[in-house]
Every structure is written in C-alpha cells, then in structure tokens.
Amino acid sequence: MRFGVNILNFGRGTGPSSLLRWARYAEDRGFHFAMISDHVAVTEQVAQQYEAPFYDPFTTLAWLAGSTERIELGTTVTVLPFRHPLLTARAVANIDNFSNGRFIFGVGVSWSETEYAALGVPFRRRGAVTDEYLEVVTRAWRQEKISHHGEFVSFDDVSTGPLPVRTPPVWIGGGSRAALRRAVKYGDAWHPLNQRMAWFRDDALPALRRLAEEAGRPVPQFAPRLPLLLTDGPLPEETRLAGQGTLDQIRQDLDDLAELGASHVLFDTYRGEPQSMRDQAEDELVLETVARHVLGPAAR
C-alpha cells in the first residue's frame, strides 16, 4: 500500500506557511501522496464542519507543485459540479504539467444544499451533473480538441491543451450505490471516507465487485481515506471507524485493508469540527507515531 497525508486547507491558523509545511512534511517523511479538500462557498452549513479561510485546492496545489519534487498531489475531493468541466480539466492538466505527472484527481458530489444554492447549481441533479462533467474532463485530457452537447453543458471545437503529462488517475469518493457505480464507470480507484472496516469487507467491496462484473469493467482500486484518531485505550469494535483507536487497532486496520486489496490509504487528522482542530505540530506528532510504530519501512 501507498500512504498519504490530508493537508488541512481550511480553518483558523491555516495560511501559506501551514500549507507549505504540510506538503514538505509529507514529502520529507516519505509519504507517497498528499491531498486537499474542496469547498467553494463557505455557507453557515459548510462552516459547521469547515471554517473559513478555505484555500482553493487547485491554486494551492499549483503552488505546492513547485515546492515539492516527488510526492503526488491531489484532491480529496473536488466537488465536480461547482466548476465548468473545461475549467476543471485545464486546471488539472496545468498542475499535472507543473508537477511532471504527479496529480491525482479525486471527485465527489458533496452534501451541502446551501453551498449548491449559493453557486446556482441544482443540488438534486448533482449526480447527473457529475457524470456528465466526468465525461468532458476525461475526454479533454486525451484529445487536443473536443465538442460536447449534453444536458448541462454544450460547446463546439474547444482546444484543450496543454494535455497532462500523464492522464491523472480518477478517484471517486462517496459510499452510496451511485458512487460505487460511478467508480466502476469512470474511476481508477474508489475513495471512500469515514467508514467502518466491517462495512468495507461485508458490504461495499462485494457490491463494488458485483457492479464491475455486471458492467464488464475492471474493479477499481481501493483507496480509502481514514479519519486518524489515536487513543490510549481501545475503542469498541462495533462502533469505531477504521483508522481510529489504539496503535494495535490501527495496525490491525491497515493489515485488514491490505488483505482487502487497498492500494492507497490517506490519513486525515481532522476530527470533523472546527473546535477540534489541533495545532499542526500535534497532528504531525500523531502521524509520526503511526508512521514509526505502525507503518515502519512501508511508509517509504
């Protein structure tokens, strides 16, 4: 498995120096990739989980691409309906060029109805918009000129260059059946977050394999995002999320994920509420502890 770090690009204390520190920390410590989340309109509903300031993932990653050398960079996840797909395709291709082929394109539909309303995007059609936009984005990475006439966007003979250095791998977020279908149809990997190990093993991954078989397509890679929480005592197995608990519990989670075929694991130190944000040095200490006692040489 390859291991990554979620860069916190929002909330009090976040700024250029903290963003650069996250990226350099991840690269210097031998993590394989670093990813950034996405919100465009920080409404009151969004701010309950992700306070302003909120740094745009694409401008931030373009800057970090020039400040790193080896680590892959990506989005966890781009809310695809929030931007015109031609704009998204070009931004990703540009960053992939700046980084010499190090971009990972994580995609999701998100959950905030008020954010959709602020941007004038139909919340109830967000899945259909995402599917159509994925068609446009992935074609724009492969063809020098494209036309498209769909339900949500239409255009003729648009030049798309520069094409990416490598076609960015597409990671599809979400745990719904629609997300699993989207992962099978469009994704190189399925990128769920905040789930229990039993759900991965007994429900989601068997469903993903069935959907791939029905569609006659390869099963996407499995690349979960884990809400990393290190505790002194064990958490109840029936309720804890994968990535949370003692070092022994987290070690067992990673062993189980490897057995389930996970290709990548993204560690997320954010605990879901603005008031729970820690100093960056505390988050680094948690990552250091897990890397030293659980990952060992596998992190490099």
Image (tube, rainbow, N blue to C red):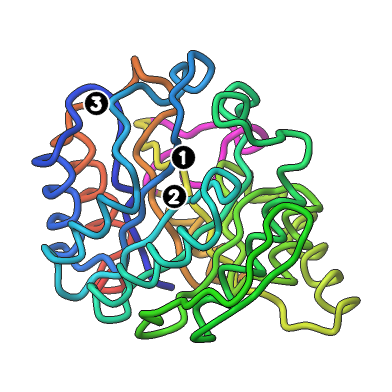
Classify residue 214 by image quadrant.
bottom right
Q: Is residue 243 magenta?
A: yes
Report, in whole angstroms, how far the alpha carbon at label 3 lies from the one at label 2. 20 Å
Q: What number is the disc on residue 250?
A: 2
Residue type at numbered disc 1: Gln
Q: Are discs 1 and 2 less than 8 Å apart at CB?
A: yes
Report, in whole angstroms, how far the alpha carbon at label 3 lies from the one at label 1. 16 Å
Q: Residues in magenta?
A: 233-247
Which mark is first along the chain, 1 or 3? 1
Is label 3 or label 1 in front? 3
Report, in whole angstroms, how far the alpha carbon at label 1 lies from the one at label 2. 6 Å
x and y percentages locating residue 184 in the rendered image = 73, 70
Classify residue 221 by image quadrant.
bottom right
* The N terminus lies in quadrant: bottom left
Q: Is residue 125 magenta?
A: no
Q: Nearer the viewer, residue 92 or 69?
A: 92
Element marked by disc 2: helix
Residue type at numbered disc 3: Arg
Drawn side of residue 159 relative to residue 239, left or right: left
Q: Which residue, given by chain and number where applicable, does mark 3 sit on?
A: 278
Q: Which residue, given by chain and number where applicable, does mark 1 sit on?
A: 244
Q: Residue at x 68, y 61 (%)?
A: 154
* The C terminus lies in quadrant: bottom left
Element marked by disc 3: loop
- Magenta part mainly helix, strand or loop? loop
